[in-house]
Image (spheres, rainbow, N blue to C red):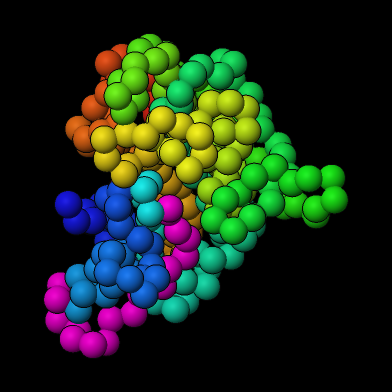
Amino acid sequence: MEPLVIFEDRHLLVARKPPGWLAQADGGSRPDVLAWARHYLEVAGHKPGRAYVGLCHRLDLHVGGLMALAKTSKAARRLHQQFLSRSIDKYYLALTQGVPPSRGRLEQDLWRAGTITRLARASEKGTRAILDYEVLGQGRLQVGVKGGEGALLAIKLLTGLKHQIRAQLASLGFPLVGDQRYGAAPGPEATIGLWACQLGLTHPVSQSRLVWVAWPGDFWPWSAWEGPAWTELWPFGEVTTP
């Protein structure tokens, strides 16, 4: 599976990142979205070796969904400022082991310890992490070789720390399905129950507000959900896409 172009103009490229892809190369052999986008623009735009791509935000390796990339340095600067000012809307679907309370805001201080993000201890100066969530449905999910009660959540991410959603839900005792690093049962594949499904931003040149949506495909763990379609459950109003 490769990234899929959702939107493109002279300034922006919005793509659906598959789980298992890095946002940017880490020196290993895994594919990454930044290199893919450069190759795509060099071929599609007939600009061998001259295509500019600005990486404005990231998704974890095992998370799929929407990513916005800049095609000019001016667009990159303006998008970066939107991310810094938290004026970009980022919504996620999540599948959890166990069922959290129906809705809430998680506001905690997090600390990065090696490859894990966790709650900061009293002696540590953590970074504030904030998200809002709503339980859309619940039911039994096949989690690896174990069956158990799970929930489908809609999440609005208000800050953007590494592994933030994973760490905050795990701290409540509801890790994402398949997220073994944060205490979930292992799954049959390396993907986890988190998907960046909706992205809203102000176009860096035209200043129009744009919103895109991309739902997960029929692969694990999303194939384990047996409730109503997320398109029927989505609580954030009517979505308009360019």
Tell me if residue 210 comes above or below residue 28 in the rendering: above
Tell me if residue 96 comes above or below residue 89 in the rendering: above
Say if the magenta span includes residue 213. Answer: no
Based on the displayed image, in which of its 4 quarters is residue 13 positioned?
bottom left
Extreme residue toward the right, this view: 123
Q: Is residue 80 found left or right of 2 in the rendered image?
A: right
Please report the residue visible at 38 percent of the width from the left and 62 percent of the height from the top. 23
Question: Residues in magenta?
Answer: 43-60
The picture places residue 120, in percent across and down from the top left corner, at: 74, 46
> Of 231 and 121, which appears nearest the observer?
121
Please report the residue visible at 30 percent of the width from the left and 24 percent of the height from the top. 145
Tell me if residue 174 comes above or below residue 58 in the rendering: above
> Of 226 and 170, which appears nearest the observer?
170
Based on the displayed image, in which of its 4 quarters is residue 230 positioned?
top left
> Of 188 and 229, which appears nearest the observer?
188
Please report the residue visible at 20 percent of the width from the left and 79 percent of the height from the top. 42
Q: Is residue 200 found left or right of 229 in the rendered image?
A: right
The picture places residue 234, in percent across and down from the top left corner, at: 40, 24
Q: Is residue 59 found left or right of 88 in the rendered image?
A: left
Total label count?
0
Examine the residues drawn in magenta and state their main secondary structure.
Answer: loop
Please report the residue visible at 41 percent of the width from the left and 30 percent of the height from the top. 185
Extreme residue toward the bottom, this view: 49
The picture places residue 211, in percent across and down from the top left corner, at: 40, 45
**Visible in this render: residue 239?**
no
